[in-house]
Image (spheres, helix red, strand yellow):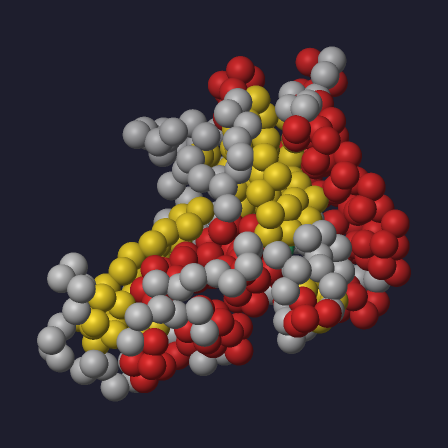
Amino acid sequence: ATNSIYMVTMSAPTNIAVIKYWGKADTHYNTPINSSLSVTLDQTELRAITTIAVSKQFTKDRFWLNGVEEDELLHSPRFRACIEGVQKLAQDHYDAQGNLIYSKEDWKHLHLHISSYNTFPTAAGLASSAAGYAALVAALCQLYHAVETFPGEFSTIARQGSGSACRSMYGGIVAWRQGTPKQEWRDSKAEPVLEDWPQLRALLLVVSDSKKDTSSTTGMQTSVQTSMLLQYRAQHIVPARLQAMEQACHARDFGTFAQLTMQDSNQFHATCLDTYPPIFYMNDISRQIVRIVTVYNSWAGELRAAYTFDAGPNAVIYCLEQHQQHLAALLCHYFPIPKGALSGLDTSSMALEESL
Ligand code: PMV
C-alpha cells in the first residue's frame, strides 16, 4: 500500500582493538596502513541500535543520532558510501503472500528515515563509530534484503563508514586484513579469527565521557604525514605481532595476549606523541590505570590483566573471568565511585570519574 511504512531495526556491538589500526593507506576507500585485530564486545549493552523506515511518502532522507537530527553527517561521503554500497546489493522485496512490494529499481527512489542510538558515550574513545556504522550497514542490509557477492563484502561497506566498523560486523575475535589496491580494495575486509573465548572479560573504565579533542580521521592524517615511528610500526612491527596475537588467541594463551595488547596500545600512543604537533589521548588517570595494572600483574607473578586505550583517555582492561572480581575490587579501591552508582549494574561496567 502507498501509505505503508516499512521498518527494520538492527543493533551492533562495539569492538576494542588489541592490535590497533592507526593510519590510512587510501582515504577515498578508507583502508589502513596495517592490519588490525579486535575483540567484539557482544555480551554487553554497549551497542548502537539503528532503525530505518522507508515509505513512498518520504520526500527526502533524514537521519537522527541520539535523537538529534544530523544533516551534515547524513550527507557526508562516508555515510553515503554505506547507503549506496548496500543499495547496489539490494534484492526485490515480497510480502508473505508473495506480492512484490519493492523492486530493486524502487529502492533507488525511496527515501529513508534513519534513527540511531548509542547506549554509551559518543566519540569518547569507546568506539561508538564502529558500532554506529556497523549497525547502519546491518540495518541497510536487512532493509534492502542485500546479498553479498563475495564473503565479507558487507564489512567492506561498513569500513567505508568507519574503519573499525568493519570488525563489528562479526562477533568474537576479528581481524581486519589491510588488503591491496587492486579491485577497489575489495580484500580490505574483516575476517573472524576466533568465534569465542568464553572466559575473556573486558572492564570498561570511563575516565571521561566528554567528546575527544582530535578525531581519529584528523589524528591519523597528521600521524601518517609526520610520524616515522608510525611507518616503521606498520611495516616492520605489526605483521609479526599480529601473527603472534592470532596464535595466542587460538591457544587461549592469556599471558601472551595480555603482553601484546599492552605493548601495542603503548606503541599506538607513542606514535601519537611522535606525531607533530603531538596528540595526547591518555591523561593522568589513564596513566594511573597503567600503573595499577602493572603492579597487579607483578604482584600476581603472571599477566592477569591487560590495559588498552583508543583515541581517548578511557581504559579497557581485558582479564579472565576468574580474576574479574578481584581486579574490579582493586580498581574500585583506588578509584572510589559514588555510593549507589553501581547498583543494578554489572561490575564489568565501572565509572571512574575524573574528579574523584
Ligand atoms: O575507525 P576509526 O576511524 O574510528 O579509528 C579507530 C582507531 C582506534 O580506535 C584508535 C584503533 C582501532 O583499531 O580501533
Q: Is residue 178 left or right of residue 199?
A: right
Residue drawn at x 33%, y 81% is 105
Q: Residue at x 71, y 59 (%)?
A: 179
* Residue 208 seen from this side: no
Q: Quadrant of residue 220?
A: bottom right
Q: Is residue 60 visible?
A: yes
Quarter of image, res 248: top right
Identify the residue at horizontal 43%, vertical 61% (top origin): 147
Compared to 247, does 79 lie above or below? below
Count of picture labels: 0
| Percent of width and height locating residue 352 | 50, 38
How far across and down, in percent of the image, does residue 195 sit? 53, 34
Q: Residue furthest front?
A: 98
Left/right placement of residue 242 relative to residue 148 reads: right
In terms of depth relative to the viewer, which is nearer, 343 or 85? Answer: 85
Coordinates of residue 249 in the picture (x, y in percent): 66, 30
